[in-house]
Image (tube, helix red, strand yellow):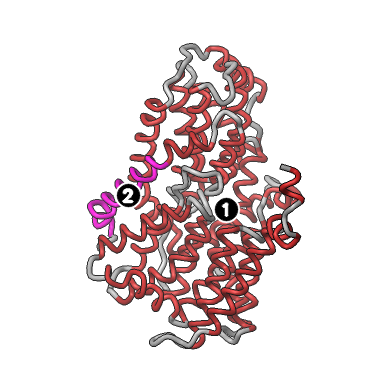
Amino acid sequence: MQQSYRSRPGWLSYLLDNSRFVIIALTLVIFFWVLSLPGPAGLSPEGLKSIAIFALCLIFWVTNVIPLMITSLLAIILFPMMGILDANLAYSLFGNKAVFFILGAFILASAIIRSGLSSRITLWVLQAFGQSPKKLLLGIQVLAAFLSFWMSEHAVVAMLFPIVLEIAESLNLVQGESNYGKCLFLNMGWGCVIGGIATFLGGARAPLAVGILNELTGKTIDFLPWALAALPTVIGLLIFNYFLLNKMFPAEIKDISVAEKMLKQKLALKGKASSREKLMGILMLFTIFAWIFGGEKIGLANIALAAVVVAFCFNLMKWKEVEEDVNWGILLMYGGAICLGFAMDKTGAAGWLAKKVLGNLGDRPYVFLSAFALLSIFLTEVMSNSAVIALLMPMAISLANSFNIDPRIVTLAITIPAGLAFCLPMGTPAVAITVSSGYVATKDTAKAGWILNIYGWIIFTVFMIIYWPLIGFKI
């Protein structure tokens, strides 16, 4: 084997050992090849340039040869450099209110975790569900989903992971072999994934999509209508997931009294709730109330940032904690994605691509929307869901305008399914953290995940057709 390696030509060894540079080089070849093409009928020169940038970003996002946020920065600088957008306009898109809503939500999530409120709620709920193996699984799933309504699903799974790991160790479950161990961590990870699609707070993809929608059409979707549209799919998936995992991985244990005792001890050690926990809970209740009933008039971003200011005024958080907890790079990612979507729409590139690929579906709106939903679910398994939004939204909205379909419905049809990554660790950190436990293998997530994907697409489509018109989203 060693001899075979040494006998390889030098150029081949270099390519195999430096695949990242090879991908970058091939991507640049594709980029300049697209730029050299004669402009197709119906596409402006600026539109062709936008497609070249779009192809470059897409390959970089899928392969992750450079960080996602750096790819977004590359898009930001290419549009002005190539004469597609004015520099002031391109950079101003970083100031989109969706970006500031994401920032406010991340800071508030940091404060909830740092105050200890989230861990107290977690221990209390798990203790309440700790009487039997199946009830504990149900408690973990419901808790993970509910917390992901109000915090990033990534933060929730990171917070729950050590507690679930301690439960598994207290029960002496064997890594990679215990069915109950698989169920514990899959209910945790997939509960976060499912709950994360319910509101704007579970993941930044929803605010990103609404930001793109607003930039391209001037329309928006508020907090409550979004939650009402997503909740039936969330509930349906949670019920199905619970029974699916119990069927595919039947528990081999009957008694969890050791874990129940451990949870009681941890809760007792926390003592009474601190004033910081209580005040943080009150602040979040007022913030959620304001998002639901005042989001349209006041603005979601304004409410989020106002809550952050109040938290600092009452000393409920420290800036050092915020610096450590907030993923600042993700803000660059979303600013670049909004810029890419804006440029693709304004140059006509999105409409031209959409009509070439899916234009014949415009006279069948239900097929059109369900096709985009299925495509969104498929793509989010192999690439960042934010990249999926940046890829599909401009094309879908352009077609929606052409075929007189409400672009708000298109936004929901793409963005809600884009959060349903169950199969592969690359799809979402929630699955990656689940697999990192050692109790779950990628073959386990793939084995049950594809069933959840198909079921999720089916019930999502059913609710879209039957239920959405009842809440004001008429197709």
- At 69% from the left and 47% from the top, the residue drawn is 317
Give the quadrant of residue 242. top left
Give the quadrant of residue 278. top right
Left or right of 391: which side holds 120? right
Mark 2 lies on residue: 460
Give the quadrant of residue 456. top left
Answer whether labels 1 and 2 touch (C-beta < 8 Å).
no
Could you say which is closer to the camera, residue 373 or residue 266? Answer: 373
x then y, percent, for residue 378 = 42, 53
Q: Is residue 425 above or below residue 475?
A: above
Left or right of 210: which side holds 306? right
Left or right of 186: which side holds 155? right
Left or right of 278: which side holds 3? right
- At 51% from the left and 62% from the top, the residue drawn is 208
- The N terminus: image quadrant: top right
Q: Is residue 133 above or below residue 89?
A: above
Query: Under tag 2, what secondary structure?
Result: helix
**What stretch of residues is rendered in magenta?**
450-472
N-terminal-most mark, 1 or 2 = 1
- Kindly identify the amino acid type of the residue bearing the numbered disc 2: Phe
x then y, percent, for residue 374 = 36, 55
- Kindly identify the amino acid type of the residue bearing the numbered disc 1: Ala
Does the rendering let one see residue 293?
A: no
Kindly report the distance in space between the C-alpha atoms of the residues bearing marks 1 and 2.
26 Å
Residue density around tag 1, few if under 14, some if 14–19, many if 20 or more, within 10 Å: many
- The C terminus: image quadrant: bottom left
Q: Is residue 26 magenta?
A: no
x then y, percent, for residue 116 = 64, 35
Q: Main secondary structure of the magenta part?
A: helix
Mark 1 lies on residue: 105
Could you say which is closer to the camera, residue 72 or residue 9? Answer: 9
